[in-house]
Amino acid sequence: MAKRNTDHLPNAKITGSTLKKAARVFEFTGKHKWKLYLGLFFLLLTGGTALLFPMLLGGLVKTIEQKDFSQIDQIGFFLIVVLSLQSVFSYFRIYLFVNYTENTLASLRQAVYAHMIRLPMSFFVQKRVGDLNSMMSSDISQIQDTLTTTIAEFLRQIILIIGGIILLLFLSPKLTLLMLAIVPVVAVAAVVFGRFIRKTSRQIQDKIAESNTIVEETLQGIANVKAFANEIYENMRYRKSTEEIVRNAIRGGVYRGAFASFIIFCLFGAIVAVIWFGVNLASKNQLYIGDLISFILYSAFVGASFGGVAELYAQIQKAVGATERVFEILNEQTENLEFKKLDESIRINGEVEFRNIAFSYPSRKEYEVLKQISFIAKKGETIAIVGPSGSGKSTIASLLLRFYDVNEGAIIIDGKESQLYSLTDLRNNMAIVPQDVLLFGGSIKENIAYGKPDATMEDIINAAKQANAFDFINSFPEKFETIVGERGVKLSGGQRQRVAIARAVLKNPSILILDEATSSLDSESERVVQEALDKLMQGRTSFVIAHRLSTIRNADKIIVIDKGIVKEQGTHEQLMQVPDGLYASLSKLQFDSVL
């Protein structure tokens, strides 16, 4: 398994509290817990057999000193048996830990994703998608690495350190005291020094990345560079960046050279000191040469384990921090959703009343977006909502869908407060066609069926026809199986809008929300899409959030909002007659801009 780069992940302080939080990972073990226990048993056997090897090897050498050659074959056989057992134990240890970890992490990933998509919109407004992606990838991968190898290796190193020191004391207490005074200190110092070297290397890589960014920006914006005659400026900027790379790299070279000198002198010097002292003891008949060989091997085990434990402990700290971040998501309060099909939801007629609505976003509670908003939409009416940018138009759509709950007042649907409906029932009776349509990366058929996942192919084709989308879909070689690409990039804006309309048609909503659905289209695309929208709006209560006022002249009622307040409401003809009215002013501005 390739080692992942986890240097960017912060370390968490390991305390009883943080370990208790991290232990929640084991709640997702389920029926696989026995694999962990059996894996720990094989880990203990692996450590035990590893400790036997130096003792047997020293015993083999001692047969020469003691001139007792009768045991050579027996010890050699035992060495082969120990190595074989260690290989078998290691195989089962790794297999069981990987099996246990993958099943546990799969359950954790599924739980986090299922929980995350049920979180309210207020959560997603305050979190960046990149951070959530990082949590799902880097953090859970860090937990995966820790459960698969780090914890097992950490425990194995502890077994080798404790077992090794006990056996060292048994072989020679004097030599053990010397070894413990030198080797572990040098090993830990080497680890600390090595981490400092890696940190310096990361800084150099960061500077190289910065210089590459300059190249990328300059080449992408080469027209601007030339238009402003800034070739010299960009050259100087890149030269300054590369000179900084050189300074950092030379400083890094100094550190690496010092590290190499440290390793050669201190680490190997420590080994020489232990061997020198051991040979002195052997010369005084206080230690067998075979025992000295065993001692050197155990010293290497203990020294390497001391160095390894420090690095593994840092990895465990990262895993504890990653676990905390994952469970922060799982601790968030989700929306109360009931998973039911469209056909299983209650049917809403579509009579809507906004009654004295006041609302502030959770992230900006001090700023009131809507203030005492009141209006009524009868079943089947088209309600247009217009106003300047930032007036609160799209907020009304979010409140209808109950992405947020109102602070004051109530939204009444069919004579009943919207909060008394289950979110699933409410949203199953609504559909939205936004300005910026998001299509998923699958086929056109899958994107249309998103409105009703159990729809038949006949239903999907009929929906496409009603959305004026059938002809362009049928013109593709793969027709409804055509892959739309990430976010629908392989389709034009008008085509994406019509797929979104087909999706809404298939859902057959009682309440339809059109959030500036044609504002970003050219005239021809707008005409085709508007025809499809007109079909879709028939017989439904429709809320049209419009920027182009020409598209909503036939609305049953136009609500004009400014700074969160309903300034005017009525038909197009009525509002155009209001002296100095906001709607009339907006219409005149748009008409003049067209001219």
Image (cartoon, rainbow, N blue to C red):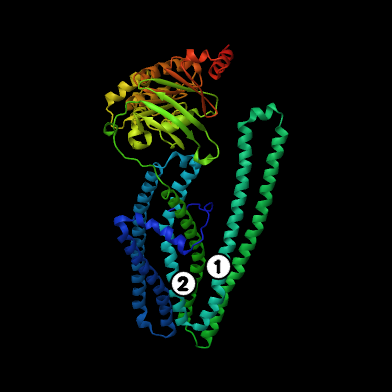
Considering depth in this image, is 492 or 391 the residue closer to the camera? 391
User: Left of 566 or right of it: where is 455?
Assistant: left
> From mark 1 to mark 2, how far is it between C-alphas?
13 Å
Q: Residue furthest top?
A: 595
Query: Residue 41 placed where, x, y %?
Result: 34, 67
Up-down relation of residue 359 to residue 466 (above or below): below
**Horizontal placement of 233 versus 526: left or right?**
right
Q: Position of residue 113 (x, y in %)?
A: 39, 44
Local secondary structure at mark 1: helix
Q: Evaluate whether residue 486 shows in this view.
A: no
Q: Residue at x 51, y 31 (%)?
A: 371
Indicate the amino acid at tag 2.
Ile
For marks 1 and 2, the one nearer the N-term is: 2
Along the line of sight, which residue is nearer the eye, 243 or 110? 110
Q: Where residue 188 is drawn, which disc sits there?
A: 1
Residue carrying label 2: 161
Q: Could you tell me how many numbered marks the image carries?
A: 2
Query: Residue at left 40%, top 73%?
Result: 53
Displayed quadrant of residue 239:
top right
**Mark 2 nearby-residue class (10 Å; few <14, some 14–19, many ≥20):** many
